Amino acid sequence: MEITYASPSLNELVEEDSTMRTTTRPLKIIPLQHPSTTSSSSSPSVSTPASLFLKWTSKLQRMTWIDWLDLFLPCSRWIRTYKWREYFQIDVMAGVTIGIMLVPQAMSYAKLAGLHPIYGLYSGFVPLFIYAIFGSSRQLAVGPVALVSLLVSNVLSGIVDSSDTELYTEMAILLALMVGILECTMGLLRLGWLIRFISHSVISGFTTASAIVIALSQAKYFLGYDIERSSKIVPLVKSIIQGADGFLWPPFVMGSIILAILLVMKHLGKSRKYLRFLRAAGPLTGVVLGTAIVKVFNPSSISLVGGIPQGLPKFSIPKEFGYATSLIPTAFLITGVAILESVGIAKALAAKNGYELDSNQELFGLGVANIFGSFFSAYPSTGSFSRSAVSHESGAKTGLAGVVTGIVMGCALLFLTPLFKYIPQVLFCDNDFIS
């Protein structure tokens, strides 16, 4: 079979060419220009330090006084645009809610760190005001957290005997100063991008393992007998099994009942929107119930918190700088936790609430909060997952919520510390379980 191909005739091609000339737009021909050696050498493809410096200086020259104010005081961004009628009541309610949640948690985390409960209250006071000024997140709840408290306990117990409470406390305060300086340095050097190299699986594994260690180490209040202090799971389990002869029923029964109440309140607060306040009110409810039971029945086998000093913390410069070199690795580790926990949740909350957040500015704000906190007897603090989630759910709009939380903590230090004397220590174990 022969295959033939039809081709247009010459007349058809001429007609098609004439129609294209009349219908198409004129084309502009641009001659090809080859770069000369002088032009290629004058405009390098790679930026030199001199060009980067020129860009940086030109950027600084374009900055107005408002830009400079926003750079050094991020709080000015939300202060300028604050809507008093819409935001004020919401921020106050959110701040009070977080404050009610923070008071028992702060004492619990201080005990986890091996410190007196008053230092947990101190760590939830001054850093909150400083972070509200220098921090860039509007929903992040700063203060003592379980993971940092566990790190403080494990490191300091290996350096100094926990029976020497004065030296132990001074080293914890010195650690707050070192962590603050390191966080400020990383923020100024713009090293917040380091969070990108840490995978989600690493964060999840680290957090889960820490939660197990925290629960096992705090079980001594739940079971009624002492447990070996360790950061490893196997020694903790062995210590719990070996000391089973000292098991006491009263703290176990009280702890189980209050733990069940806290879990129910947390579940209802998360599952039903109109009961959201129950999640934040859980720790305070447990404290009130436990204190009431102790006052009514006065069980001798349940250990109590004891006397807590009344009043605000006084200004003092951290001491014991001779131990600074041994605390450097822990300072780096706690700073890494700040990058993981605080900066990570702060960026997530910023995305949900529709504003931009600079991770470097966030690190700097946390560092300044820790530095000032160390001058007022605070141990290292950072952003909390649980309290920040409650802050977001409560509708906090600006950093004013953090200021209100700080005021609540100040009122607790001034007026409520005599009532904390009868709080059962088993409640601290319950708070750590649900945090």
Image (cartoon, rainbow, N blue to C red):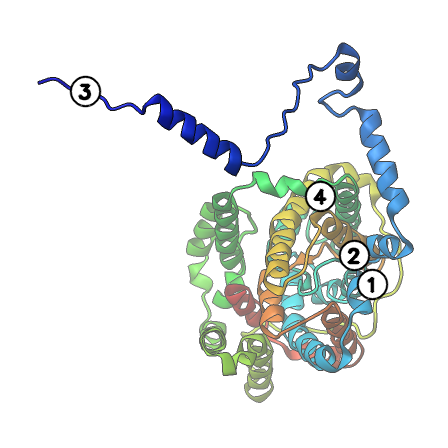
Q: Tell me which numbered mark, 4 or 1, is placed earlier along the sequence.
A: 1
Q: Are there few (<14), some (14-19), or many (20+) residues within 10 Å of tag 2? A: many
Q: Residue at the location (82% across, 28% down)?
A: 51
Kind of residue at disc 3: Thr
**Are the residues flagged by discs 3 and 1 in contact, CB closer than 8 Å?**
no
Kind of residue at disc 2: Ala
Residue at numbered disc 3: 4
Q: Tell me which numbered mark, 4 or 3, is placed earlier along the sequence.
A: 3
Q: Position of residue 138 (x, y in %)?
A: 70, 64
Q: What element does badge 2 sit on?
A: helix
Q: Which mark is residue 331?
A: 4
Kind of residue at disc 1: Ser
In this view, the mark in front (4 or 1): 1
Residue at numbered disc 1: 76
Distance, label 4 to label 2, CA atoms, is 15 Å
Q: Is residue 362 left or right of residue 265?
A: right
